[in-house]
C-alpha cells in the first residue's frame, strides 16, 4: 500500500476546490479587520472618558455639536467633561442646532457647559434654531454667536396631556386608578382633569420655568422679570441681540475665529476634536460597519425555521 500511495490522487484543500470563495474570504477578512479597526479607534478614542487626544504644538480646539431633540445628556456630558479635563484643549466651540427637548437632559448639559466655561473659553454658535432647551444648554458660554435669522429664546416649559376619557367612554372602556393621594394621577389621559389638577400642574410648570429663568438670568446677567415677561416666545437672533440673549451676529466660522483669540491659539488651522461621536455596537467594533451590514444581510436572507416578515 505504501508503494502505491504515490499514485493515489492527493486530497485537495478548500483553496484548491473553491479558489474564488477562498480569495473572496481573504479580501472580506482584510476589509472587515481594516474597517473594524477604524470603527474601534473612533469609538474608543473620541467618546466619553476614553478620549485619547493627540498633542499638537499650540493646543487643540474642541468642537461639541448639540443637534436635534435633546432626549439624553449622557454622551454630551461625557464629551464636555473630557474636553474640560484635557489640558491640550485650549477652548471649545459649542455648535447648537436644537429646538430643545427634555428639561432634565437640557439642565444637565447646561451644568456641564457651565463647569467647562469656568476653566477654559467656550463660544457658542447657533445654527438654524437654538431655542428652549437648546438655548438653556448654551447660555453659560462666554460668547454666543448666531445668524440673524436663527430662531432662539423660547425660555419656558410646556407639558401636554392627551385627553382620551371621552373616547374611552364611547368605546365602553373604563379605568380604575388606585393612588395614595388625590393628585398622584393628575394628568391621567383617562379621566377628566379637575380644576385642582390644573392648578397643581400649572404650579409644577411654573416651578420648572422659574429654575430655567434663574439659570439663564444668572448666566447672561439679565433680570429674571425681563425673561418672564417674554412669555416663553421664540424670536430671531437679531431681536435676541437687542435684549442680551445673544452677543454677536455671525457664522460658525466667525465664532471659531473669536474662540481662537480667546484661547490664545495663533495657528490658522489648529487640530479639532469633534464630538460626541455616535456610539457603535460591539459587532461594528469588531467587524466594522461594512462587515456588520454584510453579516446582518446574510442572516436576514437565510431561510431559518422561524423566518418571519417584520
Image (cartoon, rainbow, N blue to C red):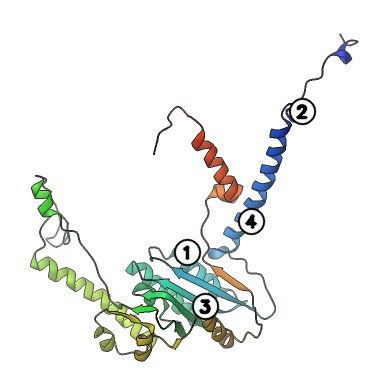
User: Residue 7 at x, y = what percent?
Assistant: 87, 13
Q: Nearer the viewer, mark 2 or mark 1?
A: 2
Query: Residue 147, position in %: x, y?
Result: 44, 81
The residue under label 1 is 75
Q: Is residue 119 at all visible to an observer of this figure?
A: no
Identify the residue at image location x=62%, y=66%. Answer: 52
Question: Mark 4 and mark 3: span between their CA atoms?
Answer: 25 Å
Measure the alpha-carbon separation of dots 4 and 1. Answer: 20 Å
Identity of the residue drawn at 57% across and 42% down: 294
Q: Secondary structure at mark 2?
A: helix
Q: Are marks 2 and 4 in contact (CB under 8 Å)?
A: no
Is residue 131 in sight in this rendering?
yes
Of callouts 2 and 1, which one flags the residue occurring earlier in the amino acid sequence?
2
For the residues labelled 4 and 1, say whether their Cβ atoms are less than 8 Å apart: no
Left or right? Give the position of 80 relative to 165. right
Nearest to N terminus: mark 4 or mark 3? 4
Q: Which residue is mark 3?
A: 93
Q: Which residue is mark 2?
A: 16
Instruction: Nearest to the eye among marks 1 and 3: give it.
Output: 3
The residue that label 4 is drawn on is 38
CA–CA distance in space, label 1 to label 3 = 16 Å
Q: Secondary structure at mark 1?
A: helix
For the residues carrying marks 2 and 3, which lies nearer the camera in this image? 2
Q: Residue at x 54, y 63 (%)?
A: 47
Does residue 59 lie above or below 302 as drawn? below
Amino acid at each position: 500500500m505504501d508503494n502505491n500511495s504515490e499514485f493515489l490522487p492527493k486530497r485537495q484543500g478548500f483553496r484548491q476546490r473553491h479558489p474564488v470563495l477562498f480569495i473572496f474570504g481573504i479580501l472580506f477578512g482584510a476589509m472587515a479587520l481594516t474597517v473594524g479597526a477604524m470603527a474601534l479607534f473612533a469609538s474608543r478614542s473620541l467618546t466619553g472618558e476614553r478620549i485619547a487626544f493627540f498633542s499638537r504644538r499650540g493646543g487643540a480646539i474642541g468642537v461639541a455639536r448639540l443637534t436635534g431633540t435633546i432626549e439624553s445628556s449622557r454622551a454630551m456630558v461625557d464629551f464636555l467633561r473630557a474636553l474640560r479635563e484635557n489640558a491640550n484643549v485650549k477652548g471649545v466651540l459649542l455648535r447648537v442646532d436644537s429646538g430643545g427637548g427634555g428639561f432634565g437632559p437640557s439642565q444637565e448639559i447646561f451644568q456641564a457647559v457651565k463647569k467647562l466655561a469656568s476653566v477654559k473659553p467656550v463660544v457658542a454658535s447657533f445654527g438654524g434654531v437654538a431655542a428652549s432647551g437648546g438655548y438653556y444648554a448654551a447660555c453659560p458660554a462666554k460668547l454666543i454667536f448666531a445668524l440673524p435669522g436663527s430662531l432662539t429664546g423660547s425660555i419656558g416649559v410646556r407639558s401636554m396631556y392627551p385627553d382620551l376619557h371621552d373616547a374611552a367612554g364611547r368605546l365602553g372602556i373604563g379605568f380604575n386608578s388606585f393612588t395614595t393621594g388625590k393628585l398622584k394621577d393628575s394628568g391621567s389621559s383617562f379621566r377628566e382633569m379637575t380644576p385642582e389638577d390644573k392648578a397643581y400642574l400649572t404650579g409644577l410648570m411654573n416651578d420648572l420655568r422659574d429654575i430655567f429663568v434663574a439659570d439663564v438670568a444668572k448666566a447672561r446677567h439679565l433680570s429674571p422679570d425681563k425673561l418672564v415677561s417674554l412669555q416663553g416666545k421664540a424670536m430671531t437672533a437679531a431681536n435676541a441681540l437687542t435684549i442680551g440673549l445673544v452677543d454677536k451676529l455671525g457664522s460658525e466660522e466667525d465664532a471659531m475665529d473669536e474662540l481662537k483669540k480667546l484661547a490664545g491659539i495663533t495657528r490658522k488651522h489648529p487640530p479639532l476634536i469633534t464630538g460626541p461621536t455616535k456610539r457603535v455596537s460591539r459587532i461594528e467594533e469588531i467587524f466594522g460597519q461594512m462587515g456588520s451590514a454584510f453579516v446582518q444581510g446574510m442572516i436576514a436572507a437565510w431561510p431559518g425555521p422561524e423566518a418571519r416578515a417584520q
